[in-house]
Amino acid sequence: MADIVLTDVQLRGIMPRARDIAAWIPPINEALERFAINSPERAAAFLAQIAHESGELERLSENLSYSAERLMAVWPKRFPTLKKARAYEHKPEKLANYVYAKRLGNGNEASGDGWRYRGRGLIQLTGRGNYRAAAQAIGQPLEQSPELLETPSVAALSAAWFWSSRGLNELADDRTDDNDGEDFVTITVTINGGKTGLSERRRYWEAAKAALT
């Protein structure tokens, strides 16, 4: 497969609200090449997902400042009552340490791992285990310096590593024996854990396919 080389015009066509397209072109192209996101089909699906996850390259750290009502909607089992939710309302660090405790390689609530290893980067990499695996794959000290995921180069490489490591290149490939739409839903669930923002992700996908073909 010939490598995809993304241009400023193509990226602008996919993410028109991104403020600094020029700064992102080199790191995204490096990430596409390094992790074999090297066809229009693979690149379109990847770019659609990171467009949604990062708010078009503008949000590289998870926003955990939720209202009590939103907490009950997002984590109904953890916040079954308004009283419980009020204790975490608009308290991002406290919330992260609670909802991510003892998950994804994190320690308990008191360890602070939930906040330290909250969602970061273009694909919102979350949890100490994922930070450690990404660090080994891309050669960056992410456990010791998690804020590196908020820099363009590391944000792009970590997202492409996660994508490749979960077999998403193969899911994105256009094959005669599969349903591309269903595969895109599976990609979304793999990244998000659910189908949050699926309609927006699909809009980005259509824009990316148009820009890359």
Image (tube, rainbow, N blue to C red):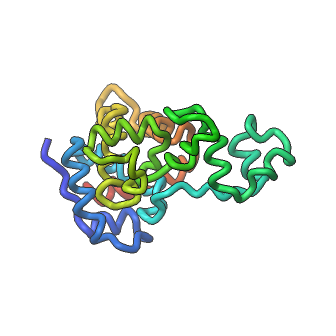
For the point 37% across and 32% down, the residue is: 166
Image quadrant in which the C terminus is located: bottom left
For the point 33% across and 57% down, the residue is: 210
Q: Quadrant of residue 72?
A: top right
Name the spot of residue 100 as percent of width and height, x first.
Answer: 59, 39
Q: Is residue 148 above or below residue 125?
A: below
Q: Quadrant of residue 7?
A: bottom left
Q: Is residue 29 left or right of residue 106?
A: left
Residue nearest the viewer, comparing 202 with 144: 144
The residue positioned farthest toward the bottom in the image shown: 19
For the point 56% across and 49% down, the residue is: 115
Q: Is residue 196 left or right of residue 178?
A: right
Residue nearest the viewer, comparing 104 with 30: 104
The residue positioned farthest toward the left in the image shown: 2
Q: Is residue 205 above or below residue 59?
A: above
The residue positioned farthest toward the top in the image shown: 177
Q: Is residue 182 visible?
A: yes
Name the spot of residue 185 as percent of width and height, x first.
Answer: 48, 38
Name the spot of residue 19 as percent of width and height, x first.
Answer: 40, 74
